[in-house]
Amino acid sequence: MNIDERRDRGEGVVGYVVLVPVALFMVMLGVQAAVYFHAANIAQHAGARAVAVAARSGTGAAAGEAEARTVVHDSGSTLVGVTVDGGDVVRASVTVRVSQVVPLFPSSVTRRAVAPKERFVPEDQR
Protein backbone atom coordinates (compact mmCIF):
# COMPACT_ATOMS: atom_id res chain seq x y z
CA MET A 1 0.00 0.00 0.00
CA ASN A 2 1.54 3.26 -1.01
CA ILE A 3 1.14 6.64 0.68
CA ASP A 4 -1.58 7.94 -1.70
CA GLU A 5 -3.82 4.94 -0.97
CA ARG A 6 -3.47 5.47 2.79
CA ARG A 7 -4.42 9.14 2.47
CA ASP A 8 -7.64 8.28 0.56
CA ARG A 9 -8.90 5.77 3.14
CA GLY A 10 -12.25 6.87 4.62
CA GLU A 11 -12.96 9.38 1.87
CA GLY A 12 -16.12 7.51 0.83
CA VAL A 13 -17.47 7.47 4.37
CA VAL A 14 -16.95 11.22 4.71
CA GLY A 15 -18.76 11.75 1.41
CA TYR A 16 -21.74 9.74 2.63
CA VAL A 17 -21.79 11.54 5.97
CA VAL A 18 -22.18 14.82 4.08
CA LEU A 19 -24.43 13.60 1.24
CA VAL A 20 -27.00 11.49 3.10
CA PRO A 21 -28.35 14.26 5.40
CA VAL A 22 -28.60 16.65 2.44
CA ALA A 23 -30.44 14.05 0.35
CA LEU A 24 -32.73 13.18 3.28
CA PHE A 25 -33.51 16.86 3.85
CA MET A 26 -34.40 17.30 0.18
CA VAL A 27 -36.76 14.32 0.31
CA MET A 28 -38.40 15.62 3.48
CA LEU A 29 -38.73 19.06 1.90
CA GLY A 30 -40.57 17.46 -1.02
CA VAL A 31 -42.88 15.62 1.38
CA GLN A 32 -43.53 18.87 3.28
CA ALA A 33 -44.37 20.69 0.05
CA ALA A 34 -46.82 17.93 -0.88
CA VAL A 35 -48.48 18.11 2.55
CA TYR A 36 -48.71 21.92 2.30
CA PHE A 37 -50.27 21.88 -1.17
CA HIS A 38 -52.69 19.13 -0.12
CA ALA A 39 -53.86 21.27 2.82
CA ALA A 40 -54.15 24.27 0.48
CA ASN A 41 -56.28 22.19 -1.89
CA ILE A 42 -58.57 21.13 0.96
CA ALA A 43 -58.92 24.75 2.11
CA GLN A 44 -59.73 25.88 -1.43
CA HIS A 45 -62.33 23.15 -1.87
CA ALA A 46 -63.91 23.91 1.51
CA GLY A 47 -64.09 27.61 0.63
CA ALA A 48 -65.67 26.90 -2.74
CA ARG A 49 -68.27 24.61 -1.17
CA ALA A 50 -68.96 27.18 1.58
CA VAL A 51 -69.71 29.98 -0.88
CA ALA A 52 -71.75 27.64 -3.08
CA VAL A 53 -73.98 26.73 -0.14
CA ALA A 54 -74.12 30.24 1.38
CA ALA A 55 -74.90 31.82 -2.01
CA ARG A 56 -78.07 29.79 -2.50
CA SER A 57 -81.34 31.62 -2.11
CA GLY A 58 -82.78 31.05 1.35
CA THR A 59 -79.49 30.09 3.04
CA GLY A 60 -76.95 32.17 4.89
CA ALA A 61 -73.45 32.38 6.25
CA ALA A 62 -74.09 29.78 8.96
CA ALA A 63 -74.91 27.13 6.35
CA GLY A 64 -71.70 27.99 4.47
CA GLU A 65 -69.61 27.72 7.62
CA ALA A 66 -71.18 24.36 8.45
CA GLU A 67 -70.40 23.11 4.92
CA ALA A 68 -66.76 24.20 5.21
CA ARG A 69 -66.43 22.42 8.55
CA THR A 70 -67.93 19.26 7.06
CA VAL A 71 -65.63 19.30 4.03
CA VAL A 72 -62.48 19.78 6.14
CA HIS A 73 -63.56 17.16 8.68
CA ASP A 74 -64.40 14.62 5.96
CA SER A 75 -60.98 15.13 4.39
CA GLY A 76 -59.25 14.25 7.66
CA SER A 77 -57.69 17.68 8.12
CA THR A 78 -57.89 20.11 11.02
CA LEU A 79 -59.83 23.33 10.60
CA VAL A 80 -58.21 26.38 12.18
CA GLY A 81 -60.90 28.88 11.25
CA VAL A 82 -63.69 29.66 8.81
CA THR A 83 -65.43 32.93 8.07
CA VAL A 84 -68.35 33.37 5.67
CA ASP A 85 -69.77 36.84 4.99
CA GLY A 86 -73.07 37.27 3.19
CA GLY A 87 -74.63 40.10 1.23
CA ASP A 88 -74.84 40.59 -2.52
CA VAL A 89 -71.47 38.86 -2.75
CA VAL A 90 -70.62 35.90 -0.52
CA ARG A 91 -67.04 35.65 0.69
CA ALA A 92 -65.49 32.71 2.52
CA SER A 93 -62.09 32.38 4.15
CA VAL A 94 -60.98 28.92 5.28
CA THR A 95 -57.80 28.20 7.25
CA VAL A 96 -56.52 24.62 7.54
CA ARG A 97 -53.66 23.33 9.70
CA VAL A 98 -50.61 21.98 7.87
CA SER A 99 -48.82 19.00 9.43
CA GLN A 100 -45.16 19.78 10.12
CA VAL A 101 -42.58 17.49 8.54
CA VAL A 102 -39.82 20.09 8.20
CA PRO A 103 -39.49 22.90 10.76
CA LEU A 104 -39.88 26.57 9.75
CA PHE A 105 -42.64 25.77 7.24
CA PRO A 106 -46.03 27.54 7.62
CA SER A 107 -48.28 25.78 10.14
CA SER A 108 -51.52 26.78 8.41
CA VAL A 109 -52.82 27.77 4.99
CA THR A 110 -55.71 30.11 4.18
CA ARG A 111 -57.73 30.19 0.98
CA ARG A 112 -60.57 32.49 0.01
CA ALA A 113 -63.54 32.10 -2.32
CA VAL A 114 -66.13 34.55 -3.64
CA ALA A 115 -69.49 34.03 -5.35
CA PRO A 116 -72.51 36.25 -6.09
CA LYS A 117 -75.59 35.69 -3.93
CA GLU A 118 -78.34 33.89 -5.78
CA ARG A 119 -81.53 35.89 -5.92
CA PHE A 120 -84.97 34.87 -6.99
CA VAL A 121 -86.64 37.10 -9.58
CA PRO A 122 -90.29 36.34 -10.30
CA GLU A 123 -91.10 35.69 -13.93
CA ASP A 124 -93.25 38.79 -14.34
CA GLN A 125 -90.30 40.96 -13.23
CA ARG A 126 -87.79 39.51 -15.70
Image (cartoon, rainbow, N blue to C red):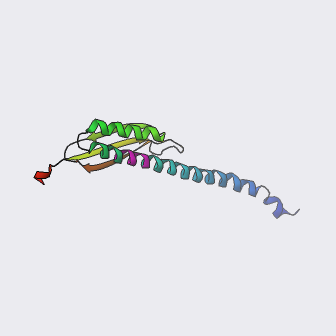
Left or right of 5, for residue 25: left
Looking at the image, residue 87 lies above or below residue 3: above
Q: Is residue 45 magenta?
A: yes
Q: Position of residue 110 (x, y in %)?
A: 37, 45
Task: Give the image location of residue 70, x and y in percent.
Answer: 40, 38
The residue lying at 74 percent from left, 54 percent from top is: 13
Side (left or right) of 101 relative to 68: right
Quick one: quadrant of the N terminus?
bottom right
The secondary structure that most of the magenta stretch takes on is helix
Outermost residue to the front:
124
Q: Quadrant of the C terminus?
A: bottom left
Q: As drawn, which residue projects farthest toward the left?
A: 125
Count of numbered tags? 0
**Front residue (pair 39, 68):** 68
Q: Residue drawn at (42%, 40%), measured in percent from left and top? A: 72
Which of the 4 image quadrants contains residue 2? Answer: bottom right
Occupied quadrant, residue 73: top left
Near-viewer residue (72 or 78): 72
Query: x, y (%) of residue 37?
Result: 46, 50
Name which residue lies at 75% across and 57% down: 12
Query: For the magenta stretch, what is the residue range?
Result: 41-47
| Residue 27, percent from left and from top | 59, 52
Can residue 9 be found in the magenta stretch? no
